[in-house]
Amino acid sequence: MLKEFQEFVSKGNVMDLAVAVIIGAAFGTIVTSLVNDIIMPFIGALGGVDFSNYFIGLSHNVTATNLADARKQGAVFAYGNFITVALNFIILAFIIFLMVKAVNNLRKRLEREKPAAPAAPPPADVALLTEIRDLLARR
């Protein structure tokens, strides 16, 4: 069983997937930081809006004005946090779209630059019939 597992792990697709998952997780962290540390502060500065603290208290005990304290007091509907996460997703999806588009364009360009494969020779019976036709046409 260990040998089968080693064969499975050593296949290229499994290793490629593992690398992709690790890079994807790191990339997700970068996008989260981009949204939370760069984009949202600008949005907040321009419109005086801080999405992270938009919430509705679901209990009468919730009187806090920021989300962290409100969560300590009781249940909250943190729709501002959801807006931030949705923005993270949209940015990440758009960047992945651009990356896939770039790879597809590169593949198309490489396909155009490839020399055309030589045509396959016709089957022997077709070649023989062509020779006969050409001989009769010359007479």
Image (cartoon, rainbow, N blue to C red):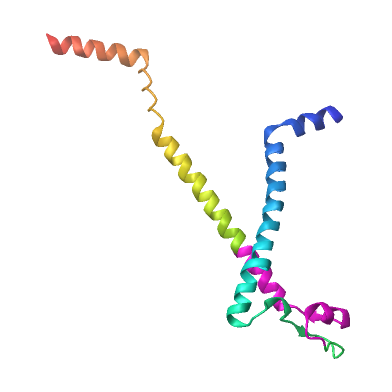
Q: Residue 133, can we see it?
A: yes
Residue 63 at what x, y percent from top left?
83, 89
Magenta-tinted stretch: 64-90
Q: Residue furthest left?
A: 139
- In this rendering, would 16 be left or right of 46? right
Residue under the image location 71 percent in, 57 percent down: 29
Residue 134 at what x, y percent from top left?
20, 13
Residue under the image location 60 percent in, 64 percent down: 90
- The verdict on residue 79 being magenta is yes
Residue under the image location 59 percent in, 59 percent down: 93
Q: In which quarter of the image is the C terminus?
A: top left
Residue 66 at what x, y percent from top left?
78, 81
In front: 90, or 43?
A: 43
Q: Residue 1, can we see it?
A: no
Quadrant for residue 33, please give it: bottom right
In front: 9, or 113?
A: 113
In front: 19, or 41?
A: 41
Quadrant for residue 36, please give it: bottom right
Residue 108 at what x, y percent from top left?
44, 41
Q: Quadrant of the N terminus?
A: top right
- In this rendering, would 48 be left or right of 1? left
- The verdict on residue 61 being magenta is no
Magenta span dominant secondary structure: helix
- In this rendering, would 93 be left or right of 67? left
- In this rendering, would 38 be left or right of 10? left
Query: Looking at the image, how many numbered discs can be counted on the residues?
Result: 0
Residue under the image location 76 percent in, 33 percent down: 8
Position above or below: 131 against 29: above
Position above or below: 124 against 2: above
